[in-house]
Structures are given as C-alpha cells and as structure tokens.
Image: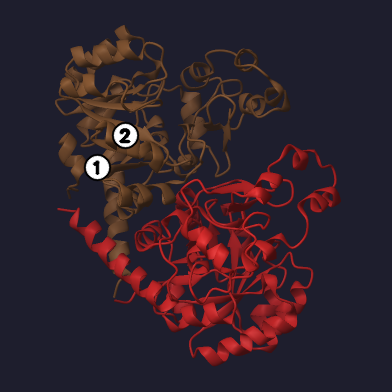
Chain colours: A brown, B red
C-alpha cells in the first residue's frame, strides 16, 4: 500500500506521516528512524544550540538516505543562527512555528527549501499561504506543547483550512493511531504530523520517566496552562498545579511569572525525567498510547491500522 | 447509497445521522423533517413542559411514519414527568443527558425503549454501558451547549470510546459536514449526532437572529464559559462576557451566580433572538455553516459530501 497526496509528492515520501520536531525528544535517531520507515522525520531544533543542531543534521544524513527536515520554533532568540546552519547543511525541508511565517521564508526559499509553517487557525494559515509557504500544519488544541489561544480543535480546524487554502494541509493535534490518520485524510488533510506518539518510541531521546508517563496517561491526564505566557498543553503534575495556581494568576510582570515557574522546566520534565516538577508537554492522544516500540514497528502498525480502518469504513457502505 | 452500522440497525434508519435534541430549536417540525429525510430526528424536551412535549410528540407522529426519539436532560426538575409522557406516548427511542445513566433506564427498558446516554469521557461511557444503555453519544468539547470538565476533543474521545466499549458509539462535537461524518466513521463511530448544523435550518424553531449568528460565525466565535455552574460552549457576546467576567468569578454562592446571570438566557438567546444579552449555545463547527437550508436539502448535501469525501479518500491509496 502507498498513499499519494500533494504532501507525499512535495517531500518524496512513501507515507503521509510526519514526525513532529519536538524539544528534547526528536534528535537524529528519531528523525532518521522515521524517514527510514517511509515517513518524514524532523529534527527538533527547539532544544538545540546551532552547533548541536549541525551535529544532529550530519548524523541524520549518515543514518538515512531518505528526506528529513528540521523544525525551528522562531521564538528562539538564536533562530536566525539555526536557520543559517540548516541552509549551510543543505537541508531543504524546514518547518517553522511561532511568530510570522514571513520571517525567514525568502532566505529559505532562495536556498531551495520547502517551507511549512505550523498554525492554529485559518487566520494564521492564510498569512502563511500569502507568505509563500508550501504547506501548513494545522494543529488542533488537543496537541501537546504550544497551542493557539482560540482553542480550535482538529475536527473543526482541518476542514476549515482545507476549504479555504490552496496549499496542502497537514493535520496535527490528537493523532496517534491509524483510525485517526484515516480520519484526518477524510477531513481533507494530505498528511498528519504526530508528536506525542513518536515521543513514546525507543529512538526518542526523551527520558524513560517521561515515556512511561505517556504510556500511563488517562483521557484527562493533560491540561492547558500558562495562558499568561504561552498556552501549553502538558501532563498534570506539581508543576502544572503551579502553572494553574492563584499565585501564578496574581503575578503582574513577565519576570515575576518566570521566576515563579523556574527555569529549564521542559528539559527537566522531558529530558531529565522529573515527573513532578518538570514540564511534561503532551497531547490528549497520550491516552491511546499502549507501547514504547521501535519506530519501524510503530510505522508498520500504523500502516496496518490504516488498512483495517479503511476496509472497515468501506464495508459500512452498501 | 446506504450506510449500515449497528446504530442504523438499532433505530432502523437509512443514514447514520442523528439530529441532536436541543433546547428551543428542535421541536416536532425539525425532528420529523430529519426522520423523513432518512436520519433520526430527536425532539429536545429540555425546553418543554410535559404537556408541550406530549403535543410535540403527537404532531411528530402525524408528520412522519419513520422512527424519531426524544432527548431528556436529566437535570430538569420535572425529568420524571417528561419520561412518563414519553412512555405513555410509546416513544421507544430516548436519549438522556446529564446525571446518572441509571436514573430512568429500568423504567424505560421495561417499556421497550432503546436508551442512549450522552457522555463526555470514557469514565462516564463505561457507567452508561454498565447501566444497560444501548449506545452512547460521545460528545467532544467542540460541541455547543453543555460540556464535560475534562475538555476532551472529538478526535481523541471517539477512538478511545470505540476501543473500550462493546456498545456502539455515536460521535458528536464539531461535526457539520460530510467530510466530518466520514472522519467520525473512520474513527470507529457508527453514527454522528449534529446539533449546531441542524439548528441552522428552516425547520429549526430557533429565532432568525440566532440562525444568522451561526451563519456568520468565525472559527473563534465560540467560547467555553460558566465553569462554576456547568461548562457551556456559546457564541461570544455581551452575555458571554458577563459569564467570563471577574465579577462572575468572585460570586460565592450559586444563588449569587444565578442572580448575576439572570434568568431564561437560553430562551432569550435562541428562541427570542437577543443576540447581545441572550445565551446562544453553539459549537465550533458553526464556522463551517454557509446556509440555512431545508432539512431535506441539507441531508441530500451531506450524503453527496460523504460520497465525494469517500471517493477522494480512496483515490489517495495507490
């Protein structure tokens, strides 16, 4: 089975399955494993300094002959340096998130990169299309990590994007199994991007404690917090309690907020495995995760699940 | 084209499309129109006294030879009286929402009714299954009106329910077009329930101002409010501002809250068309509504959209 969409053509990949570039979880090991299995792997530059990103890109090139890309959260102070490394290393697939889609696009397009911007609403998606992006990732509020303030869900966001854009749409937010991939394609998406699901694999560089937290998550284990800084979906724990506390609500300046929160919470939660005081970004789909497999086996399962879901769906029509 | 699922068999309907029983919008005209068009219409008893419900049931019987049902929000003080009317009128399809699924089920089952309970989480769905319900409506947080506090989205809720229940699942929340119906079926649902979409039809008894508000809604026109009483998704307007205000947050007793809110806000918003001070319950899918059609035409469009979406989906697989 092969699935052909404008996105699989754009990136020259076998399956319309993209692994999200995540902080502390998606280095070269994860990205190359996904690309080797027929999807598109993304190195998450959000937790890397420029030199470390260069190292990951070079190792990823050695580990896979297939296309892979890099995700750059533009809110990083050194985003321009990260972009420079990407261009110097001839990476021609770049996913940008946060901030204006036009920030680096001319530079990237002049260097032959395909550019995809992550958006949480049609309003931002139209800006990305106008800026010249090749595609958008439409990310519903069920997604882990940073979220849009309008809290639009994947079910409503994707068909609205597809009805109003000319460029192809990649669906993200809440997707971790084959049924959901088929649902996203039904909505008009031409690929899916999955974060939380790929964070819970052997090749993910996240800490075992973090992976086990995803494995044990219930349907109500995540919560949206930090509305005063940047809305983030995370696992409920002591840190999340602080982020949702009255004390936090009463902080008046950004500095006060940041002081209360403490530093490097993403690192301590995801990479160092502090399940109480770390910030453990995760999507609502964690409830559907029942194993921590090798990427190759996960991809094979997803393809099987898609096939079964498609046959089941078609059999309903008589 | 016909679609056959356990739900279409259970209710003996042609299409797995159920019109939600809504306050002030779904009387006998809407319910009978939906049933006549091959779906399942539901009379919304939530805004009716027992005598008025009886009148609507009797008129609906005259208006359609096909099955229809009644939705009863169990938080109504006179819910037992409404249930009594339903049984006396030999209605054998009952959807219950809010409160325990076991409240009326024995009485209803002893009177040959099929009983479906509306749930917002797997936790509540398992209780409904244990109580003996024939099916559940799994309603994601994108839905209009009352919502669950866990804020689980349709994309994550439905596959989790389908993976863990033996009884069939009806998907609700954010669904208003054919692509989304196909997506819900892909997720494992065996029917969809749509509220907002059917509220914006000619046969809906909602006020023209309310219907036009749905027609003009943007992706960010709804908001979740009233967390301290019962979480409700509604159109952003002056009433919603009050419901989200600091003044509201500071109220200490339920009486204080109710006094600030004022009475009969649903009636004034949905039935009387006060677009500023009325409570206009609506789902996120309002953004996808572009017309106020007759139900017959809407149903025909939905079926066409499902066919097109299914062909488009299958053509991706090569």
Tell how many labels.
Answer: 2
Residue A226 horizontal side relative to residue B226, left or right: left
Closest to the observer, A48 or B173:
B173
Task: Report crowding for label 2: few under 14, some 14 to 19, many 20 or more residues within 10 A (C-alpha).
Answer: many
Give the percent coordinates (x, y) of residue B163. 46, 55
Q: Residue at 19% of width from left, 48% of height from top?
A: A3
Q: Helix, strand or loop at disc 1?
A: loop
Q: Residue at x 26, y 54 (%)?
A: A307
| Residue A293 appearing in the image | no
In the rendered view, tell whether residue B212 sits above or below residue B316: below
Disc 1 to disc 2: CB gap under 8 Å: yes
Residue A228 occupies quadrant: top right
Q: CA distance from mark 1 to mark 2?
A: 10 Å
Q: Is B193 or A214 nearer to us in this picture? A: B193
| Left or right of B49 on screen, residue A98 | left
Q: Which residue does the numbered mark 2 point to in the structure image?
A: A128
Quadrant of the image occupied by residue B4: bottom left
- Camera-nearest residue between B315 and B300: B300
Q: Percent x, y for residue B101?
A: 67, 65
Rendered position, B218 above or below A281: below
Q: Mark 1 or mark 2: name the one nearer the start of the chain.
A: 2
Horizontal arrangement in the rendering, residue B251 relative to residue B185 (left or right)? right
Query: What residue is shown at x 68% (from left), y 19% (from top)?
Result: A252
A154 left or right of A300? Answer: right
Is residue A298 visible in this depiction of the protein?
yes
Quadrant for the C terminus of chain A, please: bottom left
Disc number placed over residue A167 in the picture, else none: 1
């Amino acid at each position: 089975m092969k699935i052909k969409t404008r996105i699989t053509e754009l990136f020259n990949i076998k399956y319309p399955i993209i692994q999200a570039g995540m902080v502390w979880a998606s280095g070269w090991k994860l990205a190359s494993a996904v690309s080797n299995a027929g999807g598109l792997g993304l190195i998450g530059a959000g937790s890397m300094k420029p030199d470390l990103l260069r190292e990951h890109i070079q190792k990823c090139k050695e580990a896979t002959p297939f296309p892979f890309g890099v995700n750059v959260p533009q809110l990083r102070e050194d985003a321009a340096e990260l972009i420079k490394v990407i261009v110097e290393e001839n990476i021609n697939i770049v996913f940008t998130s946060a901030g204006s889609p036009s920030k680096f696009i001319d530079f990237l397009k002049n260097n032959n990169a395909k550019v995809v911007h992550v958006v949480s609403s049609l309003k931002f998606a139209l800006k990305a299309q106008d800026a010249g992006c090749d595609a958008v990732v439409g990310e519903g509020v069920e997604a882990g990590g940073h979220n849009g303030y309008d809290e639009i869900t994947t079910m409503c966001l994707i068909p609205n994007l597809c009805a109003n854009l000319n460029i192809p749409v990649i669906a993200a937010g809440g997707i971790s199994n084959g049924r959901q991939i088929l649902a996203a394609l039904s909505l008009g998406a031409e690929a899916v991007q999955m974060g939380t699901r790929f964070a819970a694999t052997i090749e993910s560089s996240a800490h075992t404690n973090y992976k086990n937290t995803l494995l044990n998550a219930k349907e109500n284990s995540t919560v949206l917090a930090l509305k005063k800084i940047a809305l983030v979906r995370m696992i409920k724990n002591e840190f999340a309690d602080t982020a949702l506390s009255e004390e936090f609500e009463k902080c008046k300046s950004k500095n006060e907020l940041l002081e209360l929160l403490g530093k490097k919470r993403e690192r301590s939660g995801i990479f160092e495995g502090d399940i109480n005081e770390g910030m453990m970004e995760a999507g609502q789909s964690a409830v559907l995760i029942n194993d921590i497999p090798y990427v190759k086996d996960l991809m094979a399962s997803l393809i099987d699940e898609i096939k079964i879901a498609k046959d089941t769906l078609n059999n309903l029509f008589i």
